[in-house]
């Protein structure tokens, strides 16, 4: 069984968590609100495969401690899917990398993010295969709209499945930017 970590797994990535769990992977989920995790568990066949890590990821020391506990319990983390609005990703990278095995990071970035700039600034260790998944929008007839949570999760799953082919996977579209 693979141990996967989904950061921010109770929001738009909820279906990604269920997808991993239903394939018999252990899924550690970082979030703060218990109720949201319970909702995901109820909609997932393999509930026992979901391991909540209740922590504010801005509290770096607690985050690192809880990640290490999850690793002790469920084994080294092989894949991380991260939607993080802070420097917490650096800590996550540090803890996961210290397990000394190869792993993959799927970094979720928003529509206006500069993919190249993020790559230049983020320290990615040699044992980490780094991939970006960028969230876009949809143009329907004459107007554009944001993606729904289901469309986001589905697109992220496709990005994970195609990981070997492309460094950047776009969900929906990000051009034309004025849309
Ligand atoms: N197209 C785009 O570019 C784009 C990009 C981003 C978002 N969106 C849209 O905007 C909506 C809202 O975005 P959102 O950022 O609120 O994403 P979200 O995925 O709906 O929720 C954020 C997730 O991160 C967790 N989280 C947030 N802060 C945390 C912290 N300090 N510590 C631990 N966990 C934390 C939340 O859990 P807890 O609440 O339990 O802490 C939750 O699981 C999305 O549903 C999506 O539709 C669109």
Image (cartoon, rainbow, N blue to C red):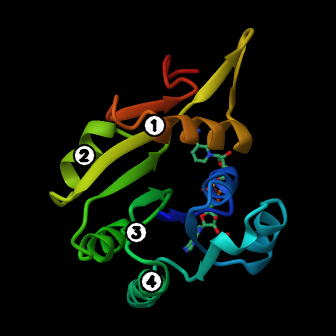
User: Which residue appears at 42% of the width and 87% of the height?
Assistant: 72
Rendering quarter of residue 140? top right
Label 1 lies in ligand 1 vicinity (Cβ under 8 Å): yes
Image quarter where the C terminus lies is top right
Q: Which of marks 3 and 4 is nearer the N terminus?
A: 4
Front position among marks 2 and 3: 3
Callout 1: helix, strand or loop?
A: loop
In this view, the residue in front, 145 or 38, is 38
Asked if marks 2 and 3 touch (Cβ < 8 Å), the reply is: no
Along the horizontal axis of the image, is 104 left or right of 117? right
Front position among marks 1 and 3: 3
Q: In this view, does 121 lie above or below 113?
A: below
Asked if marks 1 and 3 touch (Cβ < 8 Å), the reply is: no
Instruction: Give how far apart the Cα atoms at labels 1 and 2 are.
Output: 15 Å
Q: Name the residue under label 1.
A: 112
In this view, the residue in front, 172 or 77, is 77
Q: Mark 2 points at which residue?
A: 119
Callout 3: helix, strand or loop?
A: loop
Rendering quarter of residue 79? bottom left
User: Which residue appears at 36% of the width and 71% of the height?
Assistant: 92
Instruction: Give how far apart the Cα atoms at labels 1 and 3 are.
Output: 29 Å
Along the horizontal axis of the image, is 148 left or right of 20? right
Q: Name the residue under label 4.
A: 63
Q: In this view, does 109 lie above or below 151?
A: below
Q: Name the residue under label 3.
A: 77
Q: In this view, does 36 lie above or below 19?
A: below
In this view, the residue in front, 84 or 17, is 17
Instruction: Give how far apart the Cα atoms at labels 3 and 4 are.
Output: 15 Å
Q: Earlier in the sequence, mark 4 or mark 1?
A: 4
Q: Which of marks 2 and 3 is nearer the N terminus?
A: 3
Along the horizontal axis of the image, is 120 left or right of 71? left
Instruction: Give how far apart the Cα atoms at labels 2 and 4 are.
Output: 23 Å
């Amino acid at each position: 069984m693979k141990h996967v970590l989904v950061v921010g797994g109770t929001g738009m990535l909820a279906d990604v968590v269920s997808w991993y769990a239903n394939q018999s992977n252990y899924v550690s989920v970082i979030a703060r609100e218990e109720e949201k995790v319970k909702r995901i568990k109820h909609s997932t066949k393999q509930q026992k495969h979901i391991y909540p890590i209740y922590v504010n990821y801005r509290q770096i020391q607690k985050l690192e401690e809880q990640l290490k506990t999850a690793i002790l319990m469920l084994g080294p983390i092989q894949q991380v899917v991260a939607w993080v609005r802070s420097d917490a990703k650096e800590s996550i990278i540090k803890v996961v990398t210290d397990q000394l095995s190869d792993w993959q990071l799927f970094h979720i970035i928003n529509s206006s993010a500069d993919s190249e700039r993020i790559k230049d600034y983020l320290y990615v260790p040699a044992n980490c295969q780094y991939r970006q998944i960028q969230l876009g929008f949809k143009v329907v007839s004459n107007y554009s709209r944001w993606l729904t949570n289901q469309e986001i999760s589905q697109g992220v799953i496709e990005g994970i499945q195609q990981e070997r082919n492309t460094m950047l996977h776009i969900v929906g579209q990000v051009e034309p930017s004025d849309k």
